[in-house]
């Protein structure tokens, strides 16, 4: 399920749980950056953002892993109705500057698009979760792999969508393409806590389903992954990804499991989205271009993992031409996802300091 509830920190406080990252062309000369937070917002998680956290779209303008610019979003305290103000800043230079540093581009209120001084726009608020996929089948598929069974038939029926009717909070920016600083760049998202203790990164996101396949259990491994940098991914996680991919290839009787595993490592690591501003979005780990809201991330990633088409579907969400391109939040009377997944007891813990 992408990055939903991916770590103990994310389970404890959804405001620190990055869900999905999208980047795609907008009007000529502009692009949209969009990230979701708070899976199952309003049921399992809040509908606000943490005032002591900074939310960032991070860019390596040369397409590598050395970040050299970022869009940074910070929030004030929510009012009695849960509304907040968001400030957007743009940073050029090395990482690690104080939480509110950068050139301020603009500020605005919950659920209303507002202008940025670079000619762009910003929006944040509650919306329908744009991610979809048959998570129930995926859970069973992963259990089968753990038991040395390959079960592609799990995806042959009418696909389910565990996230249907569920909401997220989201941040969307429409920005000029020259803000990326290059024609072939790398993008990821992250959240850091700051202000009352040493600044600490607590979440990052780029490729969907990286956790689902290689880090399926929230714990120390996912906390370390979220605290890390793409610059260290290849050295730190290549062996893990290779072993898992080779195991899948052997169970599915792929012709050359070693070659398949190497291709999976190259696609997933480092954990970034490659993006070429101005070109159509097409999600494909390692070789694609950004990620559009209607790209089938679930089926694309599952097919990459097994080496053949599997679990491919089309988006169940309507096309929304207007920025921020998200469907309005739903209000279905359905159980909290945290209850269905058996993690409700964790979501009531105090937010981590």
Image (cartoon, rainbow, N blue to C red):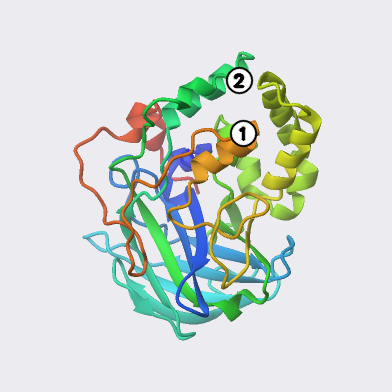
Q: Nearer the viewer, mark 1 or mark 2?
A: 1
State the residue at coordinates (68%, 51%).
286
Q: Toward the viewer: 270 or 132?
A: 132
Image location of residue 331, percent across then percent down: 20, 46
Helix, strand or loop at mark 1: loop
Q: How far apart are marks 1 and 2 (CA)?
A: 16 Å
Would you say 4 lies left or right of 85 here? right
Q: Which of marks 1 and 2 is nearer the N terminus?
A: 2
Q: Is residue 254 above or below residue 315?
A: above
Q: Toward the viewer: 325 or 87?
A: 325
The image quarter containing residue 236 is: top right
Q: Residue 308 carries which label?
A: 1
- To which residue does mark 2 refer? 145
Q: Mark 1: give few (<14), some (14-19) or many (20+) Cα within 10 Å.
A: few
Would you say 66 lies left or right of 159 here? right
Q: Is there CB contact under 8 Å for labels 1 and 2? A: no
State the residue at coordinates (44%, 56%).
293
State the residue at coordinates (36%, 63%).
325
Image location of residue 40, percent across then percent down: 34, 43
The image quarter containing residue 338 is: top left
Q: Mark 2: give few (<14), some (14-19) or many (20+) Cα within 10 Å.
A: some
């Amino acid at each position: 399920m992408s990055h939903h509830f991916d770590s103990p920190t994310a389970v404890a406080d959804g405001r620190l749980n990055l869900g999905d990252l999208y980047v795609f062309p907008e009007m000529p000369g502009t692009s949209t950056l969009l990230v979701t937070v708070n899976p199952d917002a309003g049921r399992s998680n809040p509908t606000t953002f943490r005032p002591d956290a900074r939310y960032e779209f991070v860019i390596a303008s040369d397409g590598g892993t050395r970040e050299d610019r970022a869009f940074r979003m910070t929030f004030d305290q929510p009012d009695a109705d849960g509304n907040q103000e968001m400030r957007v800043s743009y940073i050029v230079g090395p990482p690690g500057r104080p939480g509110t540093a950068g050139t301020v581009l603009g500020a605005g209120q919950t659920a209303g698009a507002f202008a940025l001084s670079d000619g762009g726009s910003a929006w944040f608020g509650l919306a329908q979760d744009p991610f979809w996929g048959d998570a129930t089948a995926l859970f069973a598929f992963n259990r089968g792999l753990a038991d040395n069974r390959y079960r592609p038939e799990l995806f042959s029926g009418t696909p389910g969508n565990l996230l249907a009717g569920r909401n997220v909070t989201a941040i969307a920016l429409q920005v000029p393409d020259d803000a990326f600083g290059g024609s072939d760049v790398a993008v990821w998202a992250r959240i850091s806590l700051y202000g009352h203790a040493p600044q600490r990164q607590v979440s990052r996101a780029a490729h969907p389903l990286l956790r689902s396949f290689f880090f399926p259990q929230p714990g120390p491994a996912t906390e370390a992954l979220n605290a890390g940098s793409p610059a260290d991914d290849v050295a730190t996680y290549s062996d893990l990804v290779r072993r898992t991919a080779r195991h899948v290839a052997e169970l599915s009787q792929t012709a050359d499991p070693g070659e398949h595993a190497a291709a999976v490592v190259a696609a997933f690591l480092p954990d970034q989205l490659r993006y070429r501003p101005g070109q159509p979005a097409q999600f494909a780990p390692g070789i694609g271009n950004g990620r559009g809201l209607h790209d089938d991330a679930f089926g694309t990633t599952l097919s990459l993992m097994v080496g053949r088409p599997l679990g491919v579907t089309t988006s169940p969400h309507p096309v929304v031409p207007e920025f921020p391109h998200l469907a309005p939040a739903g209000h279905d009377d359905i159980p909290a996802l945290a209850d269905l997944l058996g993690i409700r007891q964790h979501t009531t813990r105090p937010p981590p300091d």
